[in-house]
């Protein structure tokens, strides 16, 4: 390593283009090894002029080139059992996959992870009222547009008391109440029927719009490190219309994939009188049950689900778009408590399983290598200490991607400490000898990863 960092003395922030796989202008890592022409002028890739005040439209992402070879099938001894031929053998790092037994799907006993998909909706604030009154934290997999129309999270509705509520304020309340916000695509697409480019765009645009909404609501940005594919597709649907690893690869490069092991069944129909919105007409499904029957069914499906017979952990799939679910939520929480369950967000699970925050797990070394032990996914030890013993000498998750794309040790030197999140700005930062890498979740790619030379 040279004594003087090629980044040394540069004052401008260096924007890392395409670290997460877009096809926009690419800043080659080797170009970073050359000293900048002048102290104040690092070469910005064309079109990648980013600024905190500017939130440009999401770039249109075409299908990615096929240069990279597809991920290998899982063949290691400790790999989970192969799924049926109709499912993809390769799974992104996550939990709750169907037809899989063994440690990969284990959950801590006695813990119920309540998850709510498809919101925020016109019912969400009433879900939040209930969770608050019960002292329960949950995880919300949100979509920025589905059911909210083109206005998306800037859209409004009027509540029972005549108050006009903006969806983005509901979103902020989710975060401020200690719940976890997670990604569910922007338009609720079936991942088995989109191109890789569309899939990437669906994930990234949702993260962008969610963060833009949080900022406009006066909140802090959030990195959406958890993902749930709409319909659980392709793993739950078994749709084989998509070439093998496409969905896996795209999801894995953004977030942990969180499925479920208990479903409330609330989304399988719209009961008579039920609607996703207080202002829309009811949407009864053909042969739909009456509302009371559906309430009883939802409650029963959760309280008598298979894990409850042994007190095993559960990730419960529910939807804050269904008023029937809202109506039984207090009883559902009480019923699970009576069976000995406590409630946590998915972040608790991530800590339980990997001993690290989800931000450190998405993505990292071994991302596409099937034989890396899962405990080693996400981090690389750069000091003398073995992995997991000295976090200040490790580079993990998205920091790992940024670190190596920027030239690794040759350009940045060794880490000087573990990543930290600023409570004030919401920015995640990890210091290295020659630069600090910052994650700006409020910025769209490529402006969300920044190296600030020291
Ligand atoms: Zn959904």
Image: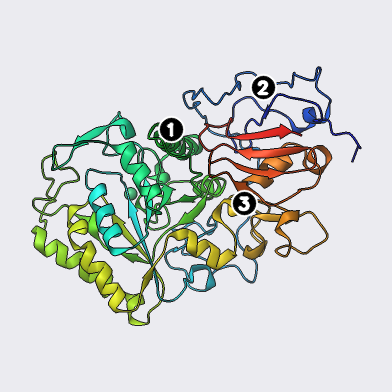
Residue at 15 percent across and 62 percent down: it is: 294
Dot 3 crowding, Cα within 10 Å, few <14, some 14–19, many 20+: some
Q: Is residue 185 left or right of residue 347?
A: left
- Is 181 placed above or below 79 here? above
Q: Which numbered dot is residue 332?
A: none
Mark 3 / mark 2, whichever is N-terminal: 2
Dot 2 crowding, Cα within 10 Å, few <14, some 14–19, many 20+: some
**Mark 3, secondary structure of its residue:** loop
Query: Under 8 Å from ligand 1: the CB of mark 1?
Result: no
Residue at 91 percent across and 37 percent down: it is: 2
**Mark 2, secondary structure of its residue:** loop
- Is 89 placed above or below 363 here? below
The residues bearing labels 3 and 2 have C-alpha atoms spaced at a distance of 29 Å
Q: Which residue is mark 3?
A: 71
Q: Is residue 306 left or right of residue 289?
A: right
Q: Which numbered dot is residue 45?
A: 2
- Is 145 placed above or below 417 here? above
Mark 2 / mark 1, whichever is N-terminal: 2
The C terminus sits in image quarter:
top right
Q: Nearer the viewer, mark 3 or mark 2?
A: 2
Q: Which residue is mark 1?
A: 212
């Amino acid at each position: 390593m040279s004594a003087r960092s090629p980044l040394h003395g540069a004052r401008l922030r260096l924007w890392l283009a395409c670290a997460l796989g877009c096809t926009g202008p690419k800043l080659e890592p080797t170009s970073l090894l050359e000293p900048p022409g002048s102290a104040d002028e690092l070469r910005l890739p064309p079109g990648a002029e980013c600024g905190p005040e500017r939130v440009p439209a999401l770039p249109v992402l075409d299908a990615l080139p096929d240069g990279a070879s597809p991920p290998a099938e899982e063949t290691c001894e400790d790999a989970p059992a192969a799924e049926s031929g109709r499912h993809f053998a390769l799974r992104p790092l996550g939990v709750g996959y169907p037809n899989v037994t063994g440690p990969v799907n284990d959950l801590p006993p006695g813990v119920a992870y309540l998850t709510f998909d498809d919101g925020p909706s016109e019912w969400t604030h009433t879900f939040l009222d209930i969770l608050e009154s019960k002292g329960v934290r949950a995880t919300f997999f949100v979509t920025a547009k589905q059911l909210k129309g083109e206005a998306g999270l800037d859209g409004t509705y009027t509540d029972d008391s005549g108050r006009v509520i903006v969806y983005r304020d509901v979103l902020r309340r989710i975060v401020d109440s200690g719940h976890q916000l997670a990604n569910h695509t922007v338009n609720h697409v079936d991942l088995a029927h989109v191109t890789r480019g569309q899939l990437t765009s669906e994930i990234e645009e949702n993260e962008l719009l969610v963060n833009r909404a949080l900022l406009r609501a006066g909140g802090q940005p959030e990195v959406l490190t958890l993902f749930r594919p709409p319909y659980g597709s392709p793993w739950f649907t078994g749709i084989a219309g998509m070439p093998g690893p496409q969905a896996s690869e795209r999801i894995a490069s953004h977030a942990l994939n969180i499925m479920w092991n208990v479903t409330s069944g609330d989304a399988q129909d719209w009961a008579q009188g039920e609607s996703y919105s207080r202002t829309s007409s009811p949407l009864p499904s053909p042969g739909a049950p009456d509302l009371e029957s559906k309430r009883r069914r939802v409650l029963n499906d959760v309280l008598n689900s298979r894990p409850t017979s042994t007190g095993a952990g559960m990730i419960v799939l529910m939807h804050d778009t269904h008023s029937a679910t809202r109506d039984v939520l207090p009883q559902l929480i009480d019923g699970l408590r009576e069976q000995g369950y406590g409630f946590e967000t998915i972040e608790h699970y991530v800590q339980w399983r990997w001993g690290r925050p989800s931000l450190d797990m998405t993505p990292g070394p071994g991302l596409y290598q099937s034989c890396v032990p899962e405990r080693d996914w996400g981090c690389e030890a750069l000091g003398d200490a073995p992995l997991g013993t000295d976090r200040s000498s490790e580079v993990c998750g998205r920091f790992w991607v940024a670190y190596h794309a920027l030239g690794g040790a040759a350009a940045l030197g060794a880490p000087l400490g573990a990543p930290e999140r600023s409570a004030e700005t919401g920015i995640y930062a990890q210091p290295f000898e020659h630069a600090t890498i910052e994650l700006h979740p409020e910025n769209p790619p490529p402006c969300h990863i920044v190296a600030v030379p020291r």
